[in-house]
Amino acid sequence: MNLINSTTLFSSLMIASVENNTAIFTLNTDILETNLINLLVIFFLLIYQGRPFFTALLEERRKAVLDKIKKSENSYNEALDKLKEAKSKVAQAELAAKQIYEEAEAVAESIKRIGLAQLEKDIKRIEDTTQVSINAQQVSVTTYLRQQVALLALRRVVSKLKTCLDPESHSQFIDSKILQLRKQK
């Protein structure tokens, strides 16, 4: 019933305004009624007072993120250098093993020509050389594995760092700083 009355009232106002050549909707130019002054004051405060704060806050965060990225890249490059070094050592160890094998074959040929006494001496020397070579290879492989583990850990750190630098974490950081400022007031 109320809806019908208000619709009828609106229709009659429209008819009356059409007959009187007056507009139904007009712009209110009274500044005090429209609260324009308050909006301008708030706008001024946000632009001129809040801008340096937010600019400094975002610049500080940007520098921190860039520093973390630079450190991660440096660590990654160091790990790559160590990996290259380890691969080089492994290649050297493989070459040494190949030389030992070739030497062992040469010794075996000479054993055929030399007597049994000389055979025992050569076997002892080969065992010692082989043991030293095995020990050297074990050290080399252990070093290589350590470097691989360090590289893997570094890759995980870089991966985790990339996931920490997503837009959502930036938003959370900015929101927490804004909340801290509100608490200080």
Image (cartoon, helix red, strand yellow):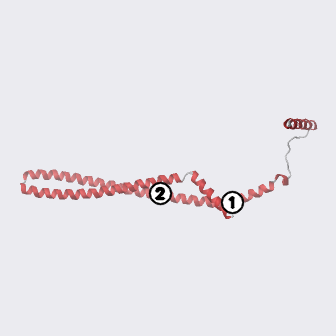
Inspect the image, locate mark 1, and give the three-letter code of the amino acid beneath it.
Gly
Q: Quadrant of residue 22?
A: top right
* Residue 146 appears left or right of 106: right
Question: Picture coordinates of residue 20 (x, y %)?
Answer: 93, 38
* Residue 60 appears left or right of 103: right
- The numbered mark at residue 50 is 1
- The numbered mark at residue 169 is none
Q: Residue furthest bottom?
A: 184
Q: How busy is the neighbourhood of tag 2: few (under 14 within 10 Å), some, or many (20 plus)?
A: some
Q: Nearer the viewer, residue 153 or 115?
A: 153
Question: Picture coordinates of residue 39 (x, y %)?
Answer: 77, 55
Identify the residue shown where x is 40% and y is 55%.
151
Is disc 1 placed on a helix, strand or loop? helix
Identify the residue shown where x is 77% and y is 58%.
41
Quadrant location of the N terminus in the rendered image: top right
Q: Residue furthest right?
A: 20
Inspect the image, locate mark 2, and give the three-letter code of the amino acid beneath it.
Ser
Residue that mark 2 sits on: 72
Q: Tell whether label 2 touches label 1 (CB within 8 Å).
A: no
Can you say whether 171 is above or below 7 in the image?
below
Question: Picture coordinates of residue 164 (x, y %)?
Answer: 53, 53
Q: Nearer the viewer, residue 88 or 184?
A: 184
Q: Quadrant of residue 50?
A: bottom right
